[in-house]
C-alpha cells in the first residue's frame, strides 16, 4: 500500500532564517513558522492556539529563504515531516520533529515582514526589476512602435523556485 507524508502550512516566520552549509557546499536554511487557530468556546469567549513548526530547506530554495525571508513574514510551506534521533553527550536519546521543506511561497506585500507578492518584469538588462505600480506585465514598447510586447515562456527566469 502507498503512503503519504505531506505537510502544508501557512504562517508567519518566528525568526530570520539561520543559514549553514553542508560539506558539499549546499545551503541549508532553518527557521520556525507559527500557525494560529482561533475559535469560540462554549461560553462564547475567544480562544487562540499557536503552534510552532521547525522548518528546514536544502539547496537553491534555502538560499532564497535566507535572502528574502524575514521575521514576521507570512509564508506558504509544503514539505514532509521528518524525525531526527540522536544521543547527546550524556547518553540521553533525543528526538526532534521538523518539516523538510520542498516548496516555499512568500505571501503578503512588500511592507510588513519582508514577504513579497510584488510583480517583476525581466525586460531591463536581462535582470529582474520591480515594475512600476499600475504598469501591466509585459507592457512597453516593442521596437519603439508603442505596441504591447507579448511575453514568451523563454523570458522567465527558471532559477527562482517560487
Image: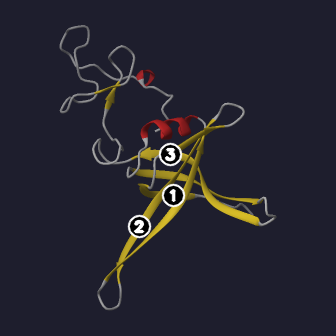
Please provide percent x and percent y for residue 23.
72, 34
Graded by Cα atoms within 10 Å as few (under 14), some (14 to 19) or many (20 or more), the crowding at tag 3 reads: many
Q: Secondary structure at mark 1?
A: strand
Please provide percent x and percent y for residue 105.
44, 45
| Whether residue 157 is situated above or below residue 107 in the rendered picture | above
Q: Which residue is mark 3?
A: 17
* Quadrant in the picture for the N terminus: bottom right
Q: Secondary structure at mark 3?
A: loop
Q: Which residue is mark 2?
A: 36
Report the Cα–Cα distance between label 2 and label 3. Answer: 20 Å
First in sequence, mark 2 or 3: give its number.
Answer: 3
Q: Which residue is mark 1?
A: 8
In terms of image quadrants, where is residue 140? top left
- Closer-to-camera residue (159/28): 28
Report the Cα–Cα distance between label 2 and label 1. Answer: 14 Å
| Image position of 95 (left or right of 44) | right
Asked if disc 2 and disc 3 are in contact, CB closer than 8 Å, the reply is: no
Q: Residue at x 39, y 16 (%)?
A: 126
First in sequence, mark 1 or 3: give its number.
Answer: 1
Report the Cα–Cα distance between label 1 and label 3. Answer: 19 Å
Amino acid at each position: 500500500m502507498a503512503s503519504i507524508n505531506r505537510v502544508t502550512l501557512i504562517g508567519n516566520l518566528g525568526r530570520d532564517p539561520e543559514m549553514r552549509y553542508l560539506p558539499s557546499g549546499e545551503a541549508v536554511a532553518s527557521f520556525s513558522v507559527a500557525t494560529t487557530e482561533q475559535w469560540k468556546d462554549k461560553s462564547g469567549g475567544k480562544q487562540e492556539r499557536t503552534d510552532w513548526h521547525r522548518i528546514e530547506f536544502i539547496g537553491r530554495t534555502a538560499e532564497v529563504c535566507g535572502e528574502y525571508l524575514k521575521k514576521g513574514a507570512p509564508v506558504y510551506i509544503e514539505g514532509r515531516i521528518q524525525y531526527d534521533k540522536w544521543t547527546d553527550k550524556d547518553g540521553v536519546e533525543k528526538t526532534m520533529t521538523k518539516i523538510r521543506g520542498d516548496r516555499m511561497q512568500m505571501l503578503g506585500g512588500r511592507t510588513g515582514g519582508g514577504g513579497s507578492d510584488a510583480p517583476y518584469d525581466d525586460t531591463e538588462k536581462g535582470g529582474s526589476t520591480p515594475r512600476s505600480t499600475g504598469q501591466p506585465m509585459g507592457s512597453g514598447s516593442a521596437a519603439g512602435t508603442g505596441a504591447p510586447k507579448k511575453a514568451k515562456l523563454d523570458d522567465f527566469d527558471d532559477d527562482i523556485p517560487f
